[in-house]
Image: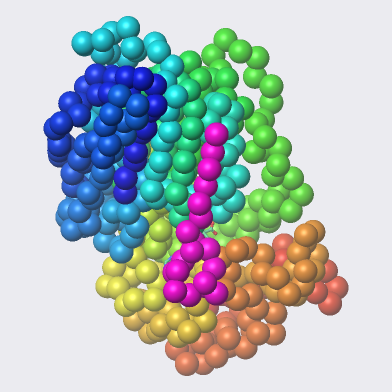
Amino acid sequence: MILNITTTRQPATDLGYLLHKHPDKFQTFELSVGKAHVFYPEKSEEKTTISLLLDIDPIDMVRGARNLGGDGFALGHYINDRPYVASSFMSVALSKAFSSAMNGKCKDKPELVDVKFPLKVTIAVISAPRGGEMLIRKIFEPLGYKVELTRHRLDEKFPEWGESKYYTLELSHTVTIKELLSHLYVLIPTLDNDKHYFVSAQEIDKLLKKGEGWLKEHHEREQITRRYLIGLDSLSRQALERLSEGEDVDGPGDELIEKTGIQKRKETLHDERIKLVVEKIVESGATRVLDLGCGEGKLIKQLVKQKQFSEITGMDVSYHELLKAKERLRYDEMPPKQKERVNLFQGSLTYQDKRLEEFDAAAVVEVIEHLDLNRLKAFERVLFEFAKPKTVVLTTPNQEYNIMWENLDAEDVRHGDHRFEWTRKEFAEWANKIGKVYHYGVELLPVGDEVENIGAPSQMAIFSYGN
Ligand code: SAH
């Protein structure tokens, strides 16, 4: 990925002084997982462009589980877009290559530090989550940037495949170099959910330092802060508190206010569901429990409160969710004895895995609907044939209930990532078949308030081996 900064303020070669990079030199900086190169594709008194090119080594990333804070979290083991999109790597590279400029220093021409330059920045490419274009505009435009975005197709040869989440971003503004660099340093990684290093409380200091003079007043400061801290609640809260020190706090931010209606109802339903799952696992007499597809650890948090459980292990395919779980559980602050009980690891439910064996009970809460139907069979074997816990408590949405949710047509699935949703009959057929094939007794239960002819919002099956 490449970031270009162009100016037309004459003499445009002043850019070299400001960034402490001689226009005739090609310079290379080592990063933990590759290199950053700095060079000038064009230089004249009228117009000068400096490029920062990142050359991320995907092999280094795989070896570089060290970048992820140990504990077996290893995003790099997955094929990913890290080498190609601007992300937290870009921030690290910016601060390495242009540290003096970022700190507002210019040895040879100190008078330039406060000069506002007409600047154009091009970043190819940037990855943005759903609604990406709006997010990009919301975070850059209030700072005065003119934003131009070119969205890339998934594959130019197959236009029918549609658009990708990748953009080329062009920003224009008249600002000081220091301001520009601090904006880029904070805002580029907010568009990208995976930080390549472990996010700790130190990130708050970095964010507040680089955000000095602009973040506090930014209308989207809450969203920027949360995204920069990859959604980790307690860090975001601390950062926002520090940002608004000395100010009136005017209730919850926009993001919270937007969460009305359906989401609130889902929230309480989810709490209810988790309570029921805990109850059923406790009743089973289990001591060693597994939470498969544990997500951000809501169930684990409740399981930890039950003394009956001597070992609680969560698994998820998503590194990001596991980080959130670690945060929710305040894992790092747990006393050693508690820590011993809890274990989190990355894995997939559709591959046989020794680490899933010898548990008394497994929970699979709102997970199967995220699997492709043609992978369901693999999941069945992984859990019921190989891992074989004595009890399995599994929940999934009841498709018939969708009609009850606002904003949803009956045919729609509730969540963008649901691959299927079953009616009560479909779920019962599937569960009973599992029971027969793998010798488990099956009990079916509604989760949430039942409506006549429609059923409850969610449904549960409890499988007991040999019954
Ligand atoms: N059980 C949690 C999360 C449900 S969301 C809760 O109830 O709060 C579904 C979760 O399943 C996500 O965290 C997703 O990352 C995970 N998941 C999806 N496919 C998976 C797979 N093949 N193996 C393991 N986890 C998977």
Instruction: Return the residue nearer the eye: 149 or 396.
Output: 149
In the rendered structure, the answer to whether residue 362 lies left or right of residue 43 reads right
- Residue found 45% across the figure and 21% down from its top: 175
- Residue found 20% across the figure and 26% down from its top: 21
- Residue found 21% across the figure and 11% down from its top: 107
Q: Is residue 104 above or below residue 394?
A: above
- Is residue 160 located in the magenta-colored stretch of the structure? yes
Report how many numbered discs are placed on residues in the image.
Answer: 0
Q: Is residue 141 above or below residue 391?
A: above
Percent coordinates x, y for residue 98 in the rendering: 26, 26
Percent coordinates x, y for residue 399 in the rendering: 70, 74
Q: Residue furthest top?
A: 111
Protein image colouring: rainbow
Write down the quadrant of residue 424 in the picture: bottom right
Instruction: Return the residue nearer the eye: 398 or 320.
Output: 320
Percent coordinates x, y for residue 300 in the rendering: 46, 53
- Residue found 22% across the figure and 49% down from its top: 55
In the rendered structure, the answer to whether residue 92 lies left or right of residue 120 reads left
In the rendered structure, the answer to whether residue 175 lies left or right of residue 394 reads left
Instruction: Return the residue nearer the eye: 2 or 118.
Output: 118
In the rendered structure, the answer to whether residue 337 lies left or right of residue 235 reads left
Instruction: Return the residue nearer the eye: 308 or 289.
Output: 289
Magenta region: 146-164
Q: Residue furthest right?
A: 452
- Is residue 440 located in the magenta-colored stretch of the structure? no
Work out whether residue 466 can be spotted: no
Percent coordinates x, y for residue 329 in the rendering: 43, 43
Work out whether residue 428 can be spotted: yes
